[in-house]
Amino acid sequence: MNQMLKYVFLFLLLITACKKQEKPCTLSDEILMTPLNLEIERMEILFFDSVDQDLDLFLEDHGVFVRDFLQESAYENRDELLEELNYMRTDESFQELYGEVMTHFSDISEIERDLENAFRYIKYYYPEFKVPRVYTFVSGFSSDIFINEEILVIGLDYFLPASHRFQPTDLPQYIAERYQKDYLVPNIVMAISSRFNKSDLKDKTLLAEMIYYGKAYHFTKSILPCVKDEYIIGYTNEEIMACYANEEMIWTHFIENELLFITNPFDVRKYTGEAPFTDAISPDAPGRIGRWLGWNIVDDYRFNKNVTLQELMADTDADKIFRQSGYKPRL
């Protein structure tokens, strides 16, 4: 792609910014009637407010949390774990961070409702899905979301407002900006999607990576139909509009450079890995643009082939999904 084309990215956004809008949606009454009662246990309150509570008793009362999240088996003995927990509970910085979390998350009923509805949607499509026990915690930015088949632990300190003085120090700014409350439930659903997202592990092509992420985004949107795309893919609304405005240019770059079937991990990462922008296309093109293209391809495939969500997620043939999608850039 020549230099002139690289720098028309934002110009095209200006003339099309008002043309792309997400369709209004409503949640399914049938799905919302799925029996499910979610209660989130506020472990940070139990841990930090009960300074007189015996830590041994705390560990005994929350065995699964201790085993899976606190990773008790990683310590030489329980006394070592108790020493670390006692430090966390009495340290002034931890106490201050906990206080800020309680200021911003004293009421988590909205998170609880959105997560409960998301679990209803997942159980509708996958009745065998076991709803995990859900906890919140303040870990000092050591864990944002921990999930396995039994428990889900949300590190609320990661989801303080982007302007807050407490921020994780190990994240680039463009990633840290996505750690806000509106991204929380989509991130959880995205993590759960990996249980159902089957792929051919022998297929190392860029296309396979694009389709894998496309299926993950499609799953998340299916479970959270009323959540804006920006909170699913982690682009700003302006970036999404710019991508649609330049979709033909982006796709031409992939085709002219014969990128779909490259297998070099470094080259694949240039288009699907975390980055502030996709420099190979334009310094104004957001990072992970191959994932965004994969999402469009998967959307077209499911629409044109009329497959169920379960059939889509179980399909490991990325090449077939692409070829049968009928994908073309929107004009």
Image: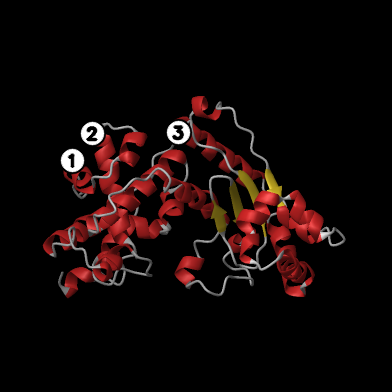
Q: Residue at x 19, y 43 (%)?
A: 320
Where is residue 189? Give x, y as percent: 48, 47
Label number found at residue 305: 2
Instruction: State left or right for residue 318 relative to residue 21.
Output: left
C-alpha gap between disc 3 and disc 1: 25 Å
Residue position for label 1: 324
Q: Height in image: 258 above or below 311?
A: below
Q: Residue at x 73, y 66 (%)?
A: 85
**Mark 2–mark 1 CB contact (< 8 Å):** yes
Label number found at residue 35: none
Q: Most extreme residue toward the front, as rendered?
A: 76
Instruction: State left or right for residue 312 relative to residue 324.
Output: right
Residue 178 in view of the camera: yes
Residue position for label 3: 126
Secondary structure of residue under mark 2: helix
Q: Residues within 10 Å of mark 3 (few under 14, many from 20)?
A: some
Amino acid at circle 2: Lys
User: Which quarter of the rendered picture does the N terminus lie within?
Assistant: bottom left
- Residue in front for this viewpoint, 68 or 198: 68
Amino acid at circle 1: Gln
Where is residue 271? Give x, y as percent: 28, 64
Q: Nearer the viewer, mark 3 or mark 1?
A: 3
- Residue in front for this viewpoint, 113 or 193: 193
C-alpha gap between disc 2 and disc 3: 21 Å
Secondary structure of residue under mark 3: loop
Return the disc, 2 or 3, that comes first in the chain's sequence.
Answer: 3
